[in-house]
């Protein structure tokens, strides 16, 4: 990201943002037809206009530089050899032979990499106080919003677009816990001015300073406290150890993959069935399983690192024993409906595992591993469908029964009418349509609703991680079994591979896929455990103020830590939790807490996608793999087209029409009962 260059056709540069949108007046240099670099930083780095007649101490007090750096900057500001002099006096001419104009130009264009940023510029940027810069930008934004209230929406859209284009920048914003437009714009500006390496150091330094400045119950955390220093030292050592172990495992996976590629490239195709190649493959696959098991060592350390970070970030100082602690309250507000769903799923999983054991026996009887894969995939699709169907039957039927009395009106509760009653608050009878046709990710949710969303994020994060780990273990185990069977029974056609050469190629692909997945997991595991620990804490914590809670939620929305499906599931659980307390959806306040049809369709579309993937695997296993007929792949595009048409056209239209019809039916029935 550069300061002067537009990010894309639709996203303006920071220079345009400050000059054309935030109203900073900067003169144009006639020779270059660009804005004056010195005047640019004079306007950005000082909270108000300054003039040469002002005292130097007063001038620096109005700057965004750190208080600890003011004395040094004051001495440098007296010499024309230093950049700070020309920022304070932008109309002064550069001395003959000076390279300061080049320094300013390079800072603006960011045309350097690594350590090539000039020391004078690097020292100047390191002197910037992040919080002071945020306040300076906040003043500019507020002044603009006072004259143009719609600008607040534009600046939020600008921030969202920037973060969606640059994942690294989004991570930096997440590290600094940005939650307001001024904080995001400050990070964008600093990111554009620093080189990559030194900006990371700047972010880490400011993160540590913010953690050490943390205040709880009016007591400021003392940096000199021995217990806090011990926690900080333990945090740093844990971070070093987990990084070292993770990188060692990454290197081990890379070496394993390299050996697999070398053995495949230089092996004789006619000797693919030799004892040496088979044993080599078995060893590589066993190494994969061992390395996968060893992953739990850095995982345990990363989990500890996440908990220590949480303690330092949300620490509470106890006067009695002078220790820091953090209260990790478990989220206790799950609805009975959700708990019932979880119990049912556990039972279904047990049944599914029992059936899978039977399927193994069936596959050996039929001498076909593809049949085993097809049966497991098909059963999983049926389990997903039945679980969802039974849940709708129970929960929505209960909801419908809450609203009517079958003994007086003769209406028997149904799941369809229950769903219609949930969505009824959002229905406009004059327009005969729903008000919400999309999900607003910046809605005004209540604190209780946000906690349910946080809990859902943590639950999804943990479940997806467990599922991915199980998938990798199964993949490695299948490869070992395949190679052992090939070694013991060379003539067995259980895996329906046309020849042993192809078997060898598939095993090589299996090893590479396992290696790539494991490397990706190791590189992302630190962020995973940090996210899991933080959202678990956010869901159960009651120590944060309402303002802090709202700012934190906006930060997580901006940074993309919360997905639409997490919001939908969290609001669903919150609505049923309130319903069980006697509060129906149409009584919840604010209105954004209420469940509506867009959320329902989003969840169902995810379900349809999962079922379709299972169907596709089943089709491929039977029609292509088991029959050894690649020509049957021609039907795959037909299945995919049918899925797309049904999921994104037929289902949304049919669901809306059905719910609309049920709501009108309920409305007409209530009108008919009125005297």
Image (cartoon, rainbow, N blue to C red):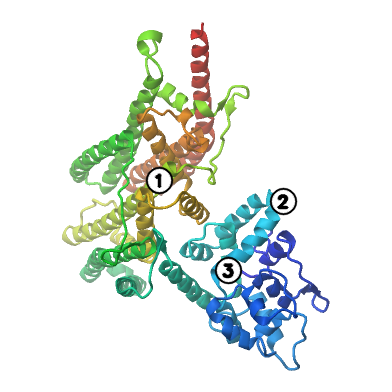
In the rendered image, the residue lying farthest to the bottom is 97
Residue at position x 25%, y 37% in the image = 343
Residue of label 1: 451
Q: Are marks 3 and 2 in contact (CB under 8 Å)?
A: no
In the rendered image, the residue lying farthest to the left is 488
Residue at position x 60%, y 86% in the image = 120
User: Is 490 situated left or right of 619 in this image?
Assistant: left
Mark whose residue sits in front, 3 or 2: 3
Q: Judge whether residue 516 can be spotted in this image.
A: no
Residue of label 2: 148
Counting from the top left corner in percent of width and height, residue 221 is at: 38, 67
Residue at position x 76%, y 93% in the image = 96
Secondary-structure class at tag 2: loop
Give the distance between the C-alpha atoms of the residues marked 1 and 2, in whole angstroms: 34 Å
Counting from the top left corner in percent of width and height, residue 512 is at: 35, 65
First in sequence, mark 3 or 2: give its number. 3
Q: Nearer the viewer, residue 504 or 662?
A: 662
In the rendered image, the residue lying farthest to the right is 30
First in sequence, mark 1 or 2: give its number. 2
Q: Quadrant of the N terminus?
A: bottom right
Counting from the top left corner in percent of width and height, residue 44 is at: 67, 70
Residue of label 3: 132
First in sequence, mark 1 or 3: give its number. 3
């Amino acid at each position: 990201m550069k300061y002067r260059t537009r990010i894309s056709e639709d996203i303006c540069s920071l220079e345009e943002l400050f000059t054309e949108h935030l109203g900073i007046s900067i003169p144009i240099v006639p020779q270059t037809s660009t804005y004056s670099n010195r005047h640019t930083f004079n306007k950005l780095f000082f909270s108000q206009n300054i003039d040469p007649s002002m005292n130097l101490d007063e001038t620096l007090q109005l700057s965004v530089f750190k208080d600890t750096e003011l004395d040094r900057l004051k001495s440098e500001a007296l010499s024309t050899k230093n950049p700070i002099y020309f920022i304070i006096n932008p109309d002064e001419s550069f001395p003959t032979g000076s390279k300061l104009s080049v320094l300013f130009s390079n800072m603006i264009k960011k045309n350097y990499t690594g350590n090539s940023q000039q020391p004078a510029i690097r020292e100047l940027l390191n002197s910037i106080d992040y919080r002071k810069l945020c306040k300076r930008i906040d003043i500019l934004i507020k002044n603009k919003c006072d004259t143009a209230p719609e600008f607040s929406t534009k600046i939020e859209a600008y921030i969202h677009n920037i973060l969606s284009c640059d994942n690294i920048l989004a991570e930096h914003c997440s590290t600094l816990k940005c939650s307001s437009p001024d904080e995001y714009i400050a990070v964008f500006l600093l990111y554009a001015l620093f080189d990559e390496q030194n900006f990371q150091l700047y972010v880490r330094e400011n993160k540590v300073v913010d953690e050490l400045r943390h205040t709880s119950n009016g007591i400021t955390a003392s940096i000199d406290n021995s217990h806090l220093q011990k926690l900080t030292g333990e945090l740093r050592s844990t971070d070093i150890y987990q990084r070292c172990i993770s990188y060692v495992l990454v290197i081990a996976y890379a070496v394993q993959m390299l050996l697999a590629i070398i053995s495949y490239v230089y092996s004789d195709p006619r000797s693919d069935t030799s004892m040496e190649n088979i044993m080599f493959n078995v060893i590589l696959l066993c190494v994969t399983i061992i390395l996968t098991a060893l992953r739990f060592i850095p995982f345990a350390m990363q989990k500890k690192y996440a908990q220590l970070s949480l303690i330092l970030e949300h620490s509470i100082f106890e006067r009695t024993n002078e220790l820091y602690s953090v209260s990790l309250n478990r989220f206790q507000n799950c609805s009975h409906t959700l708990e019932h769903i979880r119990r049912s799923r556990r039972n279904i999983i047990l049944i599914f595992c029992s059936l899978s054991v039977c399927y193994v026996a069936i596959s050996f009887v039929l001498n076909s591993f593809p049949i085993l894969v097809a049966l497991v995939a098909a059963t999983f699709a049926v389990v997903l469908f039945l679980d969802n169907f039974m849940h709708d039957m129970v929960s929505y039927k209960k909801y419908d029964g809450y609203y009517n009395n079958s003994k007086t009106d003769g209406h028997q509760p149904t799941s369809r009418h229950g769903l219609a009653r949930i969505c009824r608050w959002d229905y406009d009878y004059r327009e005969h349509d729903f008000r919400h046709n999309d999900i607003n990710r910046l809605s005004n949710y209540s604190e209780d609703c946000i906690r349910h969303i946080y809990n859902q994020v943590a639950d999804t994060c943990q479940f997806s991680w467990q599922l991915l780990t199980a998938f990798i273990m199964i993949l490695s185990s299948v490869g070992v079994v395949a190679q052992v069977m090939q070694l013991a029974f060379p003539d067995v056609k259980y895996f329906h591979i046309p020849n042993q050469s192809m078997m060898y190629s598939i095993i090589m692909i299996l090893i590479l896929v396992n290696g790539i997945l494991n490397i990706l997991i190791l590189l992302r595991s630190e962020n995973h455990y940090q996210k899991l620990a933080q959202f678990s804490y956010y869901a159960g914590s009651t120590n944060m103020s309402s303002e802090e809670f709202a700012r934190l939620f906006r930060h997580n929305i901006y940074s993309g830590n919360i997905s639409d499906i997490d919001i939908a599931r969290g609001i669903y659980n919150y609505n049923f939790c309130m319903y069980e307390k006697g509060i129906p959806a149409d009584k919840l306040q604010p209105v954004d807490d209420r469940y509506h049809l867009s959320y329902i369709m989003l969840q169902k579309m995810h379900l349809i996608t999962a079922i379709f993937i299972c169907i596709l695997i089943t089709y491929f296993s039977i029609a292509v793999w088991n029959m050894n007929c690649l020509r049957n792949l021609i039907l795959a595009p037909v299945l995919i087209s049918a899925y797309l048409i049904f999921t994104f056209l037929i289902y949304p239209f049919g669901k809306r029409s059905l719910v609309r019809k049920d709501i009108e039916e309920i409305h007409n029935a209530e009108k008919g009962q009125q005297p």
